[in-house]
Amino acid sequence: MPKKSEIKLLGTTASPYVNRVQFALNLKSIEYEFIEENLVCKSELLLTSNPVHKKVPVLFHANKPPICESLIIIEYLDEIKSDVHRILPSDPLERADNRFWANYIDNKFFPLYEELRMTIGKEGKEAIKKQIIEGSVLLEEVFVKFSNGNDYFGGDDVGYLDVVLGCFIPWRKLIEKYNEFTAFDEVRTPRLAEWTKRIWSHEAFKDVIPENGTIVNFYMILQKYKPPRVV
Amino acid sequence: MPKKSEIKLLGTTASPYVNRVQFALNLKSIEYEFIEENLVCKSELLLTSNPVHKKVPVLFHANKPPICESLIIIEYLDEIKSDVHRILPSDPLERADNRFWANYIDNKFFPLYEELRMTIGKEGKEAIKKQIIEGSVLLEEVFVKFSNGNDYFGGDDVGYLDVVLGCFIPWRKLIEKYNEFTAFDEVRTPRLAEWTKRIWSHEAFKDVIPENGTIVNFYMILQKYKPPRVV
């Protein structure tokens, strides 16, 4: 097991991509040192450790080269500590299916929330909400298939898609509140509505949830530096 | 080893994403049946097997559910046939590094070629060419690091990044020809210039290279259905 000082995570607690790495580290009982990044004035450490994207999270393991991108970090953690809480399943087909839906969540579903934040105008916003709701109904079907009657995408315990989608809960809640709607509601997506509560109170997730003030502050920074636009 | 009839690949030979799966199948000596897709009038098989993205490649393994997205398919093939020509290295840190640069190639570098095709106007085109050349110089550095004095990103034989970047060679050549420039040239990127020739004549890649007519036809279809725009 890596010693505390062996693993360092550079990030900000307001980032869902950082939160998901923290969630994975907790699931694997890996202690780590958290280095808070200032995203308005990026640190030399961030710029030199992720010169291509200049984004958090960045993971440092002992004196090895840094590892970037949340999904890559999670696979790395799952590989170096495969004996504790496997996050990806071992079956190749199930692994492929998990990776497919993780890409869907990261590249299609969650970007709709950012698009919603960026859009000014009722009509434009309603069109995006509709797409989010369609995506939620699709994810409900994915949940039913993956959970197979159990509580999580991963079955009887938290798996890859629980980590990937779970980390967006705080951001989803915030953006949905400002836009007066709920994507995972009890009528359209009853299983995901239940799942959201379950992840929220999960032992390994509890200390990962950013405080409301943190996330609201970050939202305000985004509104200032990447303001909504009329479409 | 999977029997010939056990593996089917739905795709079009003009697609670099399909080519990379063919390259991987050849490296692993997996026989497969190729099902040609018509991308102008998509088949029922494509629409039902990849309803989310409606894109090739799609891999069918025996009577299992279909697998979509080229990088996911390659990892799948590497996992089900790990005894022949490992494509990803076994070291977790090297795996992470390979995945990082594969994402860079797919999400940053190669999309610049599509942007170049789509752009009308000398100034706009020159700006994109500059970015492509900067990306090529970066990839030359990556090659030097990964190859460690050997012939391939994978070291002494074809690895993950050789497959990922290699499949773009025919498209790169075509778009560079139409735009009168060369990204991997012998002055700026001597190692990648050599590497390009090496991949082009590699035994497992030779029968994957689309005929010039095929790729030009596909280019013309793209020009018609997704025409360039003035920026």
Image (cartoon, coloured by chain):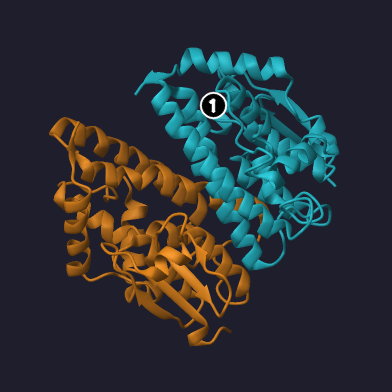
Chain colours: A cyan, B orange
Residue B97 horizontal/vertical position (percent):
57, 49
Mark 1 Cα shell of 10 Å, populated few (<14), some (14-19), many (≥20): few
Coordinates of residue A59 in the picture (x, y in percent): 67, 37
Q: Chain of mark 1?
A: A
Disc 1 marks which residue? A47
Name the image quarter holding the N terminus of chain B: bottom right
Residue A29 located left or right of residue A123: right
* Residue B94 visible in the current orientation: no
Q: Nearer the viewer, residue B43 or A70?
A: B43
Give the residue displayed 22% in from the left and 64% down from the top.
B215
Residue lying at 72% horizontally and 55% vertically, measured from the top left: A79
Q: Amino acid at mark 1?
A: Leu
Marks counted in the figure total 1
* Circle 1 SS class: helix
Q: Relative to the observer, which residue lies in front, A31 or A26? A: A26
* Relative height, residue A141 to residue B87 (above, below): above
Closest to the observer, A208 or B52: B52
Q: Is residue A59 left or right of residue A135?
A: right
Task: Spot the residue most to the front.
Answer: A187
Does B62 sit above or below residue B214? below
Q: On the rendered structure, is B98 left or right of B230?
A: right
Q: Nearer the viewer, residue A70 or B209?
A: A70
Residue at horizontal 45 percent and vertical 16 percent from the top: A227
The quarter of the displayed image where residue B124 is located: top left
Percent of width and height locating residue B231: 20, 31
Q: Does residue A219 sit above or below A116 in this rendering?
A: above
Residue shown at 79%/40% (left/top)? A198
Residue A219 seen in render: yes
The x and y percentages for residue B142 are 46, 47
